[in-house]
Image: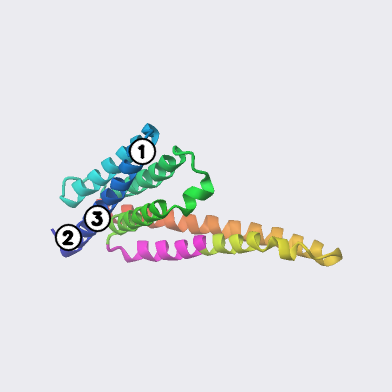
Amino acid sequence: MTQRERVIRTMVAILAVATLGTSAWGIWKSLGGTHQNWGMFGFEVVIILSAGFALAYAMGKITQAPGLALACIAGSIIVSAGLGLIATSMGVSEVLRNPIFLARIALAGGFSVLAVVEALGTCARAWNSMIKGSVLAVGSLGVIGVGLATRSSWMASAGVLQVVLIIAGILGLILMGAFFCVGVHMVIRAFEITTSENSPT
């Protein structure tokens, strides 16, 4: 085992243990009250199983498509964490402010980063495409978010100025949408580059 693999597996193990720690709260929340919430309990079981698969990876039991395995673990944690809280009749806004949910989002983000590191390996061209694509995609979404958050102020203009701002906003939205698509394509391309360079000639 190389030093790089050892570091990745150690980090995966730490994230898995932390995920199991959040499930202690989840199990208590779903079964500890006067009325058991079996919906939330079921999603907690999925999170526990996901952490178990992460520990299996850390121990070297998963050797095929490890990047994809870590990505699936991250996705399972995010979806189960959200649906588990929704099963308690929480609203979406409450779920998004819940500290445990936010902690699990952070843990899933850690698994996602490690999945990318595992998948891209040491391929410089792939990392170059991944970084540029990520910056482009996230940056364009940020610009769109700022525009939507401040639309009430620039929509308050009157007359010709309002028309100009609306047209500029629509054109800007189209442009940012195009940048987002290009960014996503570059991210996908990063994995294609890694696959092609690792394929036997």
**Residue found 19% across the figure and 46% down from its top:** 56
Tell me if 26 is positioned left or right of 161 in this view. left
Which SS does the magenta portion mostly show?
helix
Q: Which residue carries the number 2 mark? A: 6
Magenta region: which residues? Answer: 122-138
**Upstream in sequence: badge 3 or badge 2:** 2
The percent coordinates of residue 144 (x first, y second) are 60, 60
Mark 1 burial class by Cα count in 10 Å: few <14, some 14-19, many 20+: few
Observer-nearest residue: 70 or 95?
Answer: 95
Residue 178 spot, x, y in % from top left = 59, 57
| In magenta stretch: residue 180 | no
197 or 112, nearer to the observer:
112
Q: Is residue 159 left or right of residue 144?
A: right
Tag 2: amino acid: Arg
> What residue type is disc 1 on?
Gly
Separation of residues labelled 2 and 1 (CA atoms):
42 Å
Q: Which mark is drawn over residue 33?
A: 1
Of the two numbered discs 1 and 3 in the rendering, the one whose residue sits closer to the viewer? 1
Q: Nearer the viewer, mark 3 or mark 2?
A: 3
Which badge, 1 or 3, comes first in the chain's sequence?
3
- 130 within the magenta span: yes
Say which residue appears at 28% left-offset and 46% top-offset.
24
The numbered disc on residue 12 is 3
Query: Vertical placement of 171 versus 23: above or below?
Result: below
